[in-house]
Amino acid sequence: MTAPAAAIDLRSDTVTMPSAGMRRAMAEAQVGDDVLDGDPTTRRLEQRIAQLIGTEDALFFPSGTQANQTGIWLVAEHGTEVLLEANTHLVHSEVGGIAALSGAQIRPITTPDGLLTPDLVRAALRPSSPHVPRITALAVENTHNSAGGRVLPAGTYDGVVAVAREAGLSVHVDGARLWNAAVAQEVSPARLTRGADTVMVSVSKGLGCPVGSCLGFRAARRARAWEIRKRLGGGMRQSGILAAAALYALDHNFDRINEDHVNAKRFAELLCDSRMVRPSMPETNIVMLDLLRDEDTAEAAAQRVAQAGVRVAPWGPRRLRAVTHLDVTRADVERAAQIIGATLR
């Protein structure tokens, strides 16, 4: 009897499993107690990440949310405002962390496509007044998750940072998928963080690691970043086991990220003639699928598709999200598109 084909999991690029080579690197990692006197493999990762993203130093965190919140804490003054695009991860997916932890309020900027522009940031600035909060920081997400992995181009990013600097604002970059943005733009990651004060990058998304993110910053801020991470419970002991996975991924998985972008484009192209879903045309590895029938809901559609062998994520009342990653082949995305097309009809 033939076993059923394994489900194709497109819910996120966080569902990847560590490869045999990555597992060996983790098992053989040189480790120490990173809280007491430092873990040598973790420090090597921090130095390498800092070099890649163009910051003086970096700190390893167990999650992107914790690293993001630490970055905001470093740059936003208590009782002031943080500017950010209205549908960013920091707004919708970090359970009010900016208010709860940094004591700042958010000032969302509505955009048509998830991408900030210099004019939009300038328009959000308020004249000085004793009746309104000061704005002390700007957060930029690149790629923009909820906008379907859209990339903020380097030139536009430069303009946004210039406006922030003119206004005396600090800049934080949420670069959970900065690797994808850099590959799509054919530039180095550091080119997309130029002028930022703090930069978060994740190794558990496009790079395929099981756990981890890093926060980059100026060297003088390391002690303060360490203190905040400790307060948030992010101090880890033999963290080199996890850092070794990230070092392996940088050596073996970074250069293949464009394969995910090609697969995402192929997936969208195969569904572009569907009368039931409208796919976004991806710039990176995320495809949004908008349901076209009034009676369809994202939750119900995701369940039907899962029963047929493809897992996607509901992303709003009538939208699904599909994300390609290193555990998904071209044949997988072609089969996934065929299944979705046949199921949602």
Image: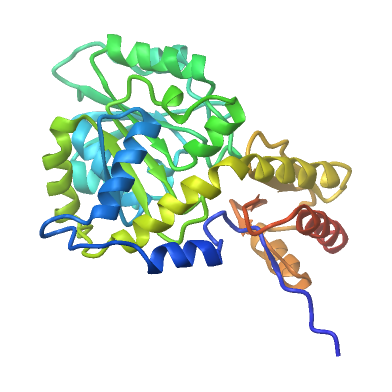
Residue 244 position in % (x across, y down): 38, 57
Give the side of residue 171 with respect to residue 264, left or right.
left
Residue at horizontal 32%, vertical 16%? 164
Q: Nearer the viewer, residue 44 or 155?
A: 44
Give the side of residue 261 with respect to residue 29, left or right.
right
Give the side of residue 332 with respect to residue 220, left or right.
right
Residue at horizontal 83%, vertical 47%? 271
Res 76 seen here: no
- Against 206, residue 126 (above or below) is above
Residue at horizontal 46%, vertical 67%? 24
Residue 300 position in % (x across, y down): 69, 65
Give the side of residue 255 with respect to residue 125, left or right.
right
Res 4 seen here: yes
- Against 231, residue 278 (above or below) is above
Q: Nearer the viewer, residue 300 or 189?
A: 189
Q: Nearer the viewer, residue 201 or 252?
A: 252
Q: Quadrant of the N terminus?
A: bottom right
Residue 74 position in % (x across, y down): 19, 35
